[in-house]
Image (tube, helix red, strand yellow):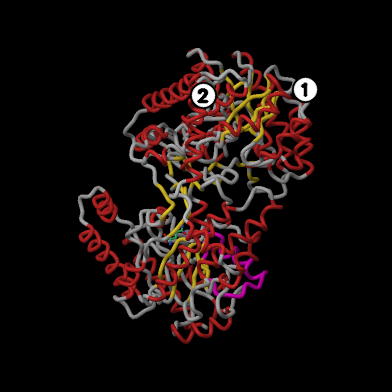
Amino acid sequence: MALAHILGYPRIGADRELKRATEAYWKGDLERPGLEAVGRELRARHWQAQRDAGLDLVTVGDFAFYDQVLDVSLLLGAVPPRFGAEREVAEGDIDLDTAFRMARGRAPSGEPAAACEMTKYFDTNYHYLVPELHDGQRFRLASQRLFSEVDEALAAGHAVKVSLLGPLSWLWLGKVKGDDGLDRLSLLDGVLAVYAAVLEELAAQGVEWVQLDEPALVQDLPQAWRQAFESAYSRLARTPVKVLLATYFGGLGDNLTLATGLAVDGLHIDAVRAPEQLTAVIDNLPSYKVLSVGAIDGRNIWRADLAALRERLADARMRLGERLWIAPSCSLLHVPVDLAAETDLDAELKSWLAFARQKLDETVSLARLLDNRPTPDDRARLEAATAALDARSASPRIHRPAVAERLAAVTPADAERASPYPERAHVQRRAFDLPLFPTTTIGSFPQTADIRAARRAFKAGELSQADYTARMREEIAFAVERQNALGIDVPVHGEPERNDMVEYFGEQLDGFAFTRFGWVQSYGSRCVKPPVIYGDVARPQPMTVAWSEYAQSLTDKPMKGMLTGPVTILQWSFVRDDQPRERTCRQIALALRDEVADLERAGIRIIQIDEPALREGLPLRQAEWQSYLDWAVTSFKLSAAVAEDATQIHTHMCYSEFNDIIASIAALDADVITIETSRSDMELLDAFQDFAYPNEIGPGVYDIHSPNIPDVAWMVQLMEKALDKIPAERLWVNPDCGLKTRGWAEVEPALAGMVEAARELRRQH
Ligand code: GLN
Ligand code: ZN
């Protein structure tokens, strides 16, 4: 029998119960026992769902009040000294509030301290807390949570498999603090000793299988790390549990024989992202090992093609027999919980989708179909899937011939501006007559409670279109008037009408759908609800022109129009799987291109196309970077290049690493790029200097994440540093990012100081 299991389940709850409970606890509205009860209740419900669906094992260890990587750090006693938890670690029972302080800097009890760094888990939108590593670090089993969760599951009568991030990937994700030269692998022995103790303890509890996640194996690994994998798993092989080594988010590539050869009892591979590796893995797999095939997409929301999968896996079933396990490609953490809650989605679209709960059923049905012992339910599910997929591939909602024709007619010249940057700059200088060090902002102004209430009322039908427009115009007028008073050289309209920089555009484009409860955990209690791109993208009408035009009518300064770029819209959505991402991206680019042309026609001569997600789209393997960057850059240029020479195109990015991709940033050929730099003390500009970046740059002069009002002298001093790297004629003065999370009481003095800093710089240069 092919065994069915999952690598992990979303823990937030179908109604985001975990979010509500943790936030209430942080605020003091819920006591600890209440919070623990919600956790227990969610775990019980999720295990029961797995069992009800017919999975052979339920997965324990995927629950976390904040983050599963943090929980492994706690298990290992890796708590930085500033949290003062030495006694808790020594006693082997770290308190939940210590975990929350590591995650958020503060908790209902304990002294506040600087929170641990947070960053994206591989190429997902899930953020984990970065383990802090240091020379001489000691590890000890310091948390009992995992074991009590196992007891809970066993007490409920479940067949338990434990899942845990593996030791190498934990170290791989960790960051050395202080001594830069420290080799993370020098800490491996200490880490392994604790993992061995954990596995012993789990065995004593009666656990047979432990899934250790090692997604680092789908990345480029230095030789020393590959060797470390071998020795580490040989060490863990001496423990009494069976280890299932889980890899996901890509193919094993040059780590394939390493992975199949490790001293473990089973291997899980991602057969969605990398179906081609299946045969080679089976060829190399020793005959005593189990192979768990990740066949159901854990990263996307499309219904699985059960008939096609049955066919594709028939050979694996024959060759592996009972050694074949079936699973989703990765943890279901990355998809929404339950499609059944989407009562507003039309039936056709809904029939094309599967969320976590539905993916349990798909996994079980696929396993039973492969075993040739389908139940009537499995047969019905197979038929329904085939019918839905046939309908989907033929649906006129998906295929718009006009979009395909337009895409086919695109030529390389369409992605190029009429003249090269130096000529454009010349024309633009005459057109705008801006001072040296022009000042601008990144787009959004404070999203006040008032604005959000108006948007909610409008969506609920309690505010008429006319009243809503009038309300937003009021906000725009206020923002423009404030900027005029402050003396900002290139004002913006302030984006009051935008709930979210992707959703706002998705809602106006054909080919996008929105769920009501399609929440996915982003970090801690924060969830996002990505749009679903299901069909060819087209723009039925202008999306931003009326707002920008109105804003321009209120000032003599050049009003900057504001768009979200094609790569960012793609990156922050669930993307259709029936055509390459590249193609979807180009479709979005063409829709934005029309918007740029319409803005220009309406008299908007400065247009910003935000691409904050350009870098995070980088593939996990470096060998694939260039082809991604090529189409990403082309997409951006396709949307921008329709602009005349005299129209100035800006872009904005806010992440902290440009070295790897500086050539592609330059290739975007935006007239101006604004970036986040203040927290790095302008060091991020080095990449631009070293590359001799040719166009204009606005290095952020203050951190918008902080409520503090930046000091004028400090901003001037930062710009002096920028001047060491970039000539004055090509520098702009602006904040790090948009201001929507701030209040006007902070924004006004901060921008007044920024304008003052620019004036000071003009006096000096
Ligand atoms: N224009 C957007 C804003 O100011 C940019 C947001 C972002 O870079 N994440 O809000
Ligand atoms: Zn930004």
Total marks placed = 2
223 relative position to 170: left or right: right
Q: Which residue range is magenta in the image?
A: 675-697
> Is 692 contained in the magenta span?
yes
Can you give x and y, in whole percent of width and height, for residue 406 in the image?
Answer: 51, 64
Q: Amino acid at mark 1?
A: Ser
Q: What distance separates the C-alpha of mark 2 from that of mark 1?
A: 31 Å
Which residue was labeled with disc 1?
287
Between 487 and 463, the one lying in front of the other is 463
Q: Amino acid at mark 2?
A: Arg
Can you give x and y, in whole percent of width and height, for residue 169 in the image?
Answer: 66, 37
> Is 90 contained in the magenta span?
no
Residue furthest bottom in the image: 430
Which quarter of the figure has residue 17? Answer: top left
Regarding mark 2 in the picture, which secondary structure is present there? helix
In the picture, the quarter occupied by the N terminus is top right
Regarding mark 1 in the picture, which secondary structure is present there? loop
Which quarter of the figure has residue 292? Answer: top right
In the rendered structure, are the residues bearing label 2 and label 1 in contact, judged by CB atoms less than 8 Å apart?
A: no
Disc assigned to residue 511: none
Measured along the vertical axis of the image, is residue 206 above or below residue 674?
A: above
Picture residue at 39% right of the left edge, 43% below the top: 515
649 relative position to 30: left or right: right
Between 529 and 521, the one lying in front of the other is 529
Picture residue at 61% right of the left edge, 73% below the top: 725
Which residue was labeled with disc 2?
379
